[in-house]
Image: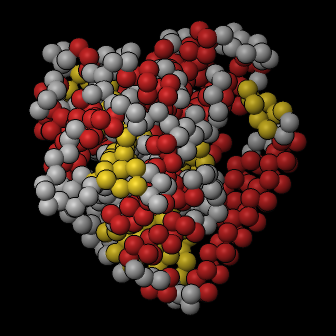
Amino acid sequence: MRILGLTSFKHDTAAALLEDGVVRAAIENDKLVRHPTRGVPDNAIQFCLDDAKITLNELDAIVLATDPIRGWLRRSAARATLSHIAPLAAARCQADEIERLAREIGDLRTLKQLKQRDAAGAKVTTLDHHACHAASAFFQSPFERALIVTLDKEGDGLSGTVAVGQGTKLRVLKRIPFTDSLAWIYSEVTRLVGFRAHEDEHKTQWFSLEGEPTFKDVFLGMMRKPGDPLPCLNHSFFEPRAGQLVFSNKFYEAIKCPAIGELNGDHSRALASSIQQACTEIVSDLIAHFLKTESLDQVCLAGGFFQNLLIVAHLEDKFRSGNVFLPPAPGNAGTAVGAGLLFWHHQQQKPRPQTMPGVFLGPKFKPQEIKDVLDNSKARYSLQSTETRKLDAAVELLKAGKIVGWYQGAAEFGPRALGNRSVLASPWAAFIKENLNDYIKHREWFRPFALAVPEEDCDVYFEASSLCRVMNSLGRARTNCDPTVLGFSLPDGRIRLHLVERNSNPLFWRLLKRFGECSPAPILLNTSFNLFGEPLVVTPRDAIRSYFCSGIDALVIDNFALSKHGAAQVVAGTRAPAISEPAVLGRGE
């Protein structure tokens, strides 16, 4: 049975193709079109169909991770309870809701027209957004029975759910209305400290480590009621302004800050630390409460809120690392997979597979396709005709302190670069943090880089959980670890880690091992391969453009190696062709 799973139409849209309950292909639409999109993810749908070599009329079901009518009814009902607080803002929001409903129904009609155009017989089924989040977490976990907690800004009128998963069934315990959204508060504080709301929350979490939680109690009083485990916003901290709810004078008095004007650095750091610590405590207490009442030990997490690695790492510390699970794509994109799994397991009552899904589910290109792009780009390259030569070339570049773009195999599905679309560097290279930040990533100094290490070598240098396989949690460096590696630790002693499994990514695993033979440890810096403000590269053309438009020294793309300036001599030095070997240098005509 072929099932096409689609996200809601709001943001981070994606598509996933499942065959008999197994995810065969999945990709975010933004990665393909290279900018944020909304609506029907046409490009992502086409990729999934092309990858399986099928058309829409060969699908058995199309499932959508949103129910527009149900979402509109929930939001309307929730806003009605706030109309006495801000009647004008409520009226404006109701008008916006009608416009949103019309847009989502229009998107749904567009999807059905695509189906009719291809004479597809598959029915389009709409599913609850947070149920799809829950399915993406539980059905991809190794647990037979577990608590499920989903949290995001808003989806179908909810900001979260608490449920129990058992076998192939999900049972909802509590629903959290979007008017009590922790994620929304976190976004508003992100705006307050000088970052972009709904875009830069990841910056706020790392920035929080630079301050003290001076105002933690203010946020706790704002976001929950005594004795209630669920988030519940105190609306006296908000007031209507320009048709929207914003922080009130009561809030600004509580944080000892004027409502108008920029915050100073210490105040911003304290606010970031306070919201981070308050959210961590609320979520931790919520999970502890329901684990106890349901007599459970294990919990699955999903929703964009849980892309906050500091919260996930704290939960692992409190509930033990083996008892916490987060899917590779916990945000909105992951609901494409969740919708397919919910339909297959919960509605069709099909058994769960024994193997866990992979993450390398995106587009993959043949060597000739890559060569054609290189030639068309007039790029000079060398062909590393064996895997050994390719690894040798990469290792020599890394040993020389060069920053290397690493483009291999299929693209990752999810927000992390896991060794197929990565920028790599040696942790022992001089000024490597500064070079990566200033000339490639163009980002703030307080944001950490991840260290990639073979999983079986991890215990020698670090303490880490299996969630670090997809960079969904944090580890700790052991005290006997190399001092240079310790320098990549966060202020609280944690460290971003990528555990590389030999079975899931054998080529990247071998690169780490080969690098370890001539370095203090088999460890490389791993950051995402993309230009500032863009999604991860997917196609060869994306990779070549990012390479030439940034400070990356060299690019290893499939078996082709490109290099700039002094890096060219390093690559050339790795070549030892046989007399009968064909020419290994190429240049586009």
- Between 466 and 479, the residue placed more toward the observer is 479
- Between 277 and 374, the residue placed more toward the observer is 374
- Between 487 and 383, the residue placed more toward the observer is 383
The residue positioned 11% from the left and 32% from the top of the image is 517
- Image height check: is 22 above or below 248? below
For this orientation, the residue located farthest to the front is: 579
Among the 4 quarters of the image, the one containing residue 385 = bottom left
Q: Is residue 411 left or right of residue 521?
A: right
The residue positioned 18% from the left and 35% from the top of the image is 515
Q: Is residue 275 left or right of residue 474?
A: right
Picture coordinates of residue 239, whole percent (x, y): 79, 30
Picture coordinates of residue 22, whole percent (x, y): 31, 69
Q: Is there any visible trace of residue 560 in the rendered image?
A: no
Picture coordinates of residue 467, whole percent (x, y): 29, 41
- Image height check: is 294 above or below 357? above
Among the 4 quarters of the image, the one containing residue 89 = top right
The residue positioned 49% from the left and 28% from the top of the image is 439
The residue positioned 57% from the left and 65% from the top of the image is 41
